[in-house]
Image: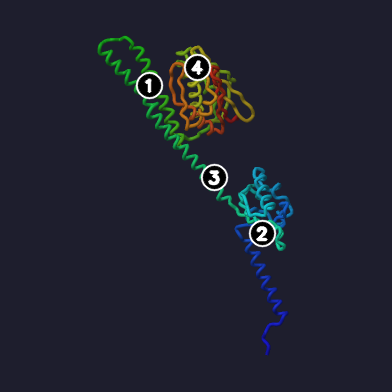
Amino acid sequence: MNNKPSYIELEKQNEELNKTSNKRLEQLLKNSFDMIVLLDSNGIQHYVSESCEKILGYRPDELIRIPVIEQLIHPEDQEKVSLAFQDIVKNSINGGTQYRHRHKNGGWVYLEAVGSNQIDNPLIQSVILNVRDITERKNAEAALIESKARLSELNATKDRFFSIIAHDLKSPFNSIFGFCELLVEQLARKDYQGVEKFAAIINRSSKQAMDLLTNLLEWARAQTGKIEFNPEYIELVTLVNDVAELFDDSAQQKSITILKDLPHNIPVFADKYMVDTILRNLIANGIKFTHPRGKIRIHTEQNENQLTVSVADNGIGIEKEAIDKLFQIEYSYSTTGTARESGTGLGLLLCKEFIEMHGGKIWVESKPGKGSTFRFTLPAI
């Protein structure tokens, strides 16, 4: 008895094997972490594996017969992808690139594609792309870059603090101690010549040390997240008047006039403590860098979206190359006032920190010898 399978039975077995093999291949492509894409020499996709739905949200039929580079690649990446594809087509080489592809939900997915030119292969006649989702990797890379930048900023902050503590904070105390010793010696000899001058220097140095220490502590609290952001409805005109009044004595000592060009009331939703600190620092700087008999003008402008507050002086101004350094912790920018007042620039960093907590911004317009105008924005009600 002949037990060998017949030709028909062999054909059926081969057909079943092919079906099983094809189903296995379909399942592999469908559940793969990567996509397989076939394109013609013009970049038109005519095959996309089913795994595209898991990666991009689109069904395969939604991604074929379309110019994918122009329609679905991020505008900033289109030229790069086009050049990489043309390089594969024209030079018959393997190649690839990374780019952003639109997801069906409207977002962007970072992909890495590696291609092989098989156009001359009669069984394929396409450029084959193996495409992988690398969004998590890109997010991790971005997070690492951000962490490095933050670490660099923290190191700059630490170095700045040490510089302030070692030099800027130490300097006024040295002045206070030195002139106190002179006072004690002269008073012991009943020599009162220059006592009033020494007392004024001690008073000025004490105020400088206190202002610096206050800003230093506030900045440290802001950096460690110890300062809470507590916005409330406040009347800005009243706050400006109250802060400006604190500087009456300082302004009078230099015969400086503080002008306020304000409406009757300006309600804002802001943190009163932070806005108070911002105004104190900007007005103090205006007095510091304005010549005797100069003027400081406080002005507001309001539109639908925001309120702009400006503090302008007609003092010594700022060099153009120094303006960019004013709000950066890594630069130690400080200059002497018109009455030899010193500072560290820490107050402006604090202003920037507090204004950004409100979603606003701060900037300065200045010309040497013509004065400076500091402006900051707050959200309008």
* 143, above or below 40, in the image: above
Give the number of the mark in front: 2 or 1.
2
Residues at badges 3 and 2 in contact (C-beta under 8 Å)? Answer: no
Q: Position of residue 194 (x, y in %)?
A: 33, 11
Compare marks 3 and 2 and give the one earlier in the sequence: 2
Q: Residue furthest bottom?
A: 1
Query: Mark 2 is on which residue type?
Result: Glu
Q: CA distance from mark 1 to mark 3?
A: 46 Å
Q: Classify mark 4: helix, strand or loop.
A: loop
Q: Position of residue 118 (x, y in %)?
A: 68, 58
Q: CA distance from mark 3 to mark 4?
A: 44 Å
What label sits on residue 290 in the rendered view? Answer: 4
Q: Which residue is mark 2?
A: 50
Q: Which residue is mark 1?
A: 206
Query: Mark 3 is on which residue type?
Result: Ala
Q: Classify mark 1: helix, strand or loop.
A: helix
Query: Mark 1 is on which residue type?
Result: Ser
Give the number of the mark in front: 4 or 1.
4
- The residue that appears at 44% across and 24% down in the rendered structure is 343
Compare marks 3 and 4 and give the one earlier in the sequence: 3
Q: CA distance from mark 2 to mark 1?
A: 74 Å
The N terminus appears in which quarter of the rendering?
bottom right
Q: Classify mark 2: helix, strand or loop.
A: loop
Compare marks 1 and 3 and give the one earlier in the sequence: 3
Give the number of the mark in front: 3 or 4.
3
* 155, above or below 101, in the image: above
Query: Mark 4 is on which residue type?
Result: Thr
The C terminus appears in which quarter of the rendering?
top right
Compare marks 4 and 2 and give the one earlier in the sequence: 2
Compare marks 4 and 1 and give the one earlier in the sequence: 1
